[in-house]
Image: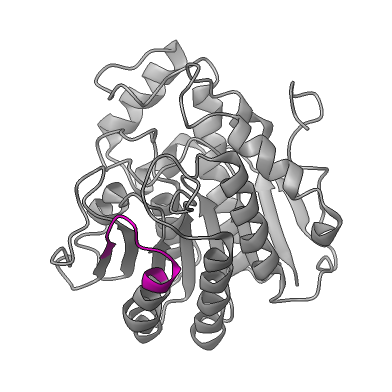
Amino acid sequence: MSTLHLTHATALGHLVHPGHPERADRVRVIERVLEQERYAGLIREQAPAAPAAALLLAHAGPYVEAVLDGLARGELAGLDADTVVSAGTLPAVLHGAGGAMQAVDEVMEGRVRNAFVSMRPPGHHAERERAAGFCFFNNVAVAARHALRVHGAGRVAILDWDAHHGNGTQGIFWSDPDVLYCSTHQWPLYPGTGAAAERGEHDTVVNVPLAAGDGGAEFQEALRAVVLPRMEAFRPDLILVSAGFDAHWRDPMADLNLTEADFGWATLRLMDVAERVCGGRIVSVLEGGYDLVGLSRSVATHVAALMEASPCRPHAGMIRHPAAVDAAAPGVV
């Protein structure tokens, strides 16, 4: 078994205004770095579009209907100034959620060891009934519920290492005893949630705030002393990663000082836990990361670590598709 990479050209069609940090070049630089020879063993597939009904796994029906209708018309009321709508947003968000679900399918059914989904816009700020912070639908939350409802997982754990707290994911699972949500993030910082005292109704929320200026030593200690022991004790059947890379020292959207090596270390330690409790099953979904150099280096290290888990060969009988971003998409390099 090997590592699966899922993406889709629709990630490039969600357009934002000039100067907006959450831009299509984020996916382009990821595609470029994963074309290097060291990633030749990646299994590459197109992220499918999620059916609208799947979004109800994490979001309220009226909210889903309103967002899908608004996106179809190219306009959506009530969003913050940073959450931009364009004609290409609807297919991008559907393929983003669908990619996360497909990654869960492949991992839970044993066809691949782990998976990385590089789609945009991100999702972890999307609440049950509210879009915010560049996010419309919560891809990781949909994926977690998909694992529970469709694949019979008893428990799912989520590690969110984005520099910004995943308020949407925390809120969706606040009262769910079957999902453990763990987050390291800069605090205080947007969206203002994520204090250590926020623990959920069933003590299944674990927040480890980091201070501006903290770097690899503090991040690694948070995982080693708090997060990873809680995840191992929870004994999930699947581990999901909200893989934001804006805690990198180069990133303009936060003030943490992680390096790509810190993300590699975290990935390997998480894989150790996954091997002990859930057969190595990990699905990683892109969230933030807005400096293109820091993002590409961090993703490269993260995916290389994921690939260490298994020999790089396709599973017998699996149909694999061409490179993840359509050749016809303008500007893809």
Residue at the image point whose x is 64% and y is 53% from the top: 297
**Relative to residue 233, is residue 223 depicted above or below?**
above
Q: How many marks?
A: 0
**Relative to residue 165, is residue 134 depicted above or below?**
above
- Rendered location of residue 158, percent (x, y): 40, 64
Residue at the image point whose x is 54% and y is 24% from the top: 14
Q: Which residues are magenta?
A: 209-219
Q: Is residue 222 visible?
A: yes
Residue at the image point whose x is 33% and y is 81% from the top: 230
Classify residue 196 by image quadrant: bottom left
> Quick check: is 215 in the magenta stretch?
yes
- The residue closer to the viewer here, 127 or 177, is 127
> Quick check: is 331 in the magenta stretch?
no
Classify residue 174 by image quadrant: bottom left
- The residue closer to the viewer here, 77 or 299, is 299
- Rendered location of residue 187, percent (x, y): 24, 54
- Rendered location of residue 314, percent (x, y): 83, 65
- Rendered location of residue 7, percent (x, y): 65, 43
Q: Is residue 42 left or right of 22 when viewed as pictured? A: right
